[in-house]
Image: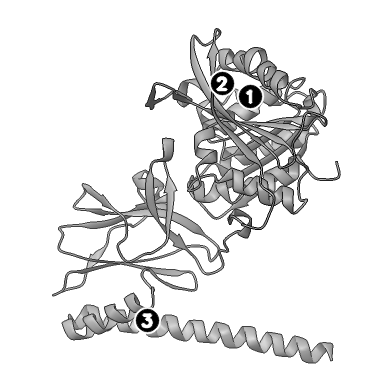
């Protein structure tokens, strides 16, 4: 019976692969015909067929056909796949189909990839793909949407979907703190779980780039926390989201100064922010129950904070860390952590920070940290980071630990 089931499964797989191969062969043949003939009638029929079925970009197995319709001197596809223009060996320039106004670019990506991109017209106009319904917001301070390429084996994470029938925590937004150490005002927001009272102390996580981690189209962290706590995948916790934007001028984002292994900013946390939080909220005042988390420069900062002050931060969530900006971080982390450190680190594999992250992974192995490391076929984007937040929280705050 088992042999029969295995045979049936293999037959299904082989049949599916054969169908995909035939579809790819048919698609290549059709595109080749349209290119050679320049037939506007054939092109119109072909274009309308793809558009009606939401198949632009057209994805077949690991092959991708980008399309753009419009008069232009040049059309380029820019995104995670070519480092938004910094990776020069990626062939991103479209080809104009003779006698038409349709541009095409064929390329390939891993079947489980997810990538942000835009279309660059005439080297100056950046636009969203008008035929692609999928978008991912990105950029410092909320930024703007990019088009999103979803390869066939990529799966969305239901943990990010807001549910109406669950208990939900409370967000205390935009608390103002006048820092004597920094010489300016800082705002932060605090998430407390459903049923929170002062009678039971909870673990706490501090999250840099708090505005973006909170934004529903970026980190969406409140929804993730509510769902994880409701499903008992993590223990109830308090989360503090630090905003790097000036309270009086939101366009003034100080993250590049604050998150660049800034010793004064670390002092602000340990001497001002944490004491204020622990005065106002019932949190466990122990490094083993206190975490720091961030992405990119914030990932660098989370690493720096934890290994510089392991008596303060016993856990760190590190996403796509910008270690290349401060390579001395490797020597800081090379000594044995005392007390023992718990680390959860993630990186994308497509023009992200996997090279530096793997180097840090080797350092963590040598100093006997408790660590988890994950890689995904994505770029340096909130589409990558938001879908790994739950994994990091589960690593750091499991329900039975």
Colour scheme of the picture: one colour
Q: Which residue corresponds to mark 2?
A: 261
Name the residue located 66 percent from the left edge and 17 percent from the top edge.
276
Mark 1 Cα within 10 Å, few/some/many (few <14, many 20+)? Answer: many
Q: Is residue 361 above or below residue 332?
A: below
Residue 235 visible? yes
Mark 3 or 2: in front is 2
CA neighbours of label 2 inside 10 A, class few (<14), some (14 to 19), many (20+): many
Location of the C terminus by quadrant is: top right
- Residues at marks 3 and 2, CA–CA distance in whole angstroms: 51 Å
* Along the line of sight, the residue nearer the viewer: 203 or 389: 203
State the residue at coordinates (49%, 9%). 183
Please tell me whether mark 1 or mark 3 is closer to you in this view: 1
Q: Which mark is residue 27?
A: 3
Q: Disc 1 marks which residue?
A: 304
Q: Earlier in the sequence, mark 3 or mark 2?
A: 3
355 or 397: nearer the eye?
A: 397
Q: Which mark is residue 71?
A: none
Q: Is residue 13 above or below residue 364?
A: below
């Amino acid at each position: 019976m088992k042999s029969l089931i295995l045979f049936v499964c293999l037959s299904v797989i082989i049949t599916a692969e054969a169908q995909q191969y035939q579809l790819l062969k048919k698609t290549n043949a059709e595109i080749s015909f349209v290119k050679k003939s320049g037939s506007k009638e054939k092109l119109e029929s072909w274009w309308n067929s793809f558009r009606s079925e939401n198949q632009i970009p057209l994805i077949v197995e690991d092959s991708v056909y980008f399309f753009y319709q419009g008069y232009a001197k040049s059309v380029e596809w820019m995104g995670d796949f070519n480092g938004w223009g910094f990776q020069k060996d990626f062939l991103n320039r479209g080809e104009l189909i003779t006698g038409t106004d349709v541009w095409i670019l064929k390329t390939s990506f891993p079947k489980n990839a997810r990538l942000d991109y835009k279309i660059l017209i005439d080297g100056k106009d950046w636009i969203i793909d008008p035929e692609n319904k999928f978008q991912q917001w990105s950029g410092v301070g909320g930024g703007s949407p990019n088009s999103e390429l979803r390869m066939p084996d990529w799966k969305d994470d239901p943990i990010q979907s807001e549910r109406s029938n669950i208990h939900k925590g409370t967000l205390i937004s935009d608390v103002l703190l006048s820092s004597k150490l920094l010489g300016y005002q800082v705002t932060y927001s605090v998430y407390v779980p459903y049923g929170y009272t002062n009678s039971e102390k909870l673990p706490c996580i501090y999250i840099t780039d708090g505005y973006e981690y909170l934004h529903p189209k970026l980190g969406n962290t409140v929804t993730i926390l509510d769902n994880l706590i409701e499903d008992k995948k993590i223990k109830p916790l308090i989360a503090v989201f630090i905003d790097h934007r000036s309270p009086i001028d939101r366009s003034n984002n100080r993250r590049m100064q604050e998150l660049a292994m800034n010793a004064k900013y670390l002092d602000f946390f340990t001497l001002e922010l944490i004491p204020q939080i622990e005065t106002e909220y019932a949190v466990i005042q122990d490094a083993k129950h206190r975490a720091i988390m961030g992405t990119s420069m914030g990932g660098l900062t989370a690493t720096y904070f934890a290994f510089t002050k392991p008596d303060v931060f016993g856990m760190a969530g590190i996403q796509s860390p910008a270690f290349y900006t401060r390579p001395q971080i490797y020597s800081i982390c090379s000594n044995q952590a005392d007390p023992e450190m718990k680390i959860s680190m993630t990186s994308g594999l497509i023009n992200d920070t996997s090279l530096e992250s793997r180097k840090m992974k080797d350092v963590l192995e040598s100093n006997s940290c408790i660590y988890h490391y994950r890689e995904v076929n994505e770029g340096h984007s909130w589409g990558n980071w938001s879908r790994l937040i739950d994994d990091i929280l589960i690593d750091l705050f499991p329900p039975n630990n």
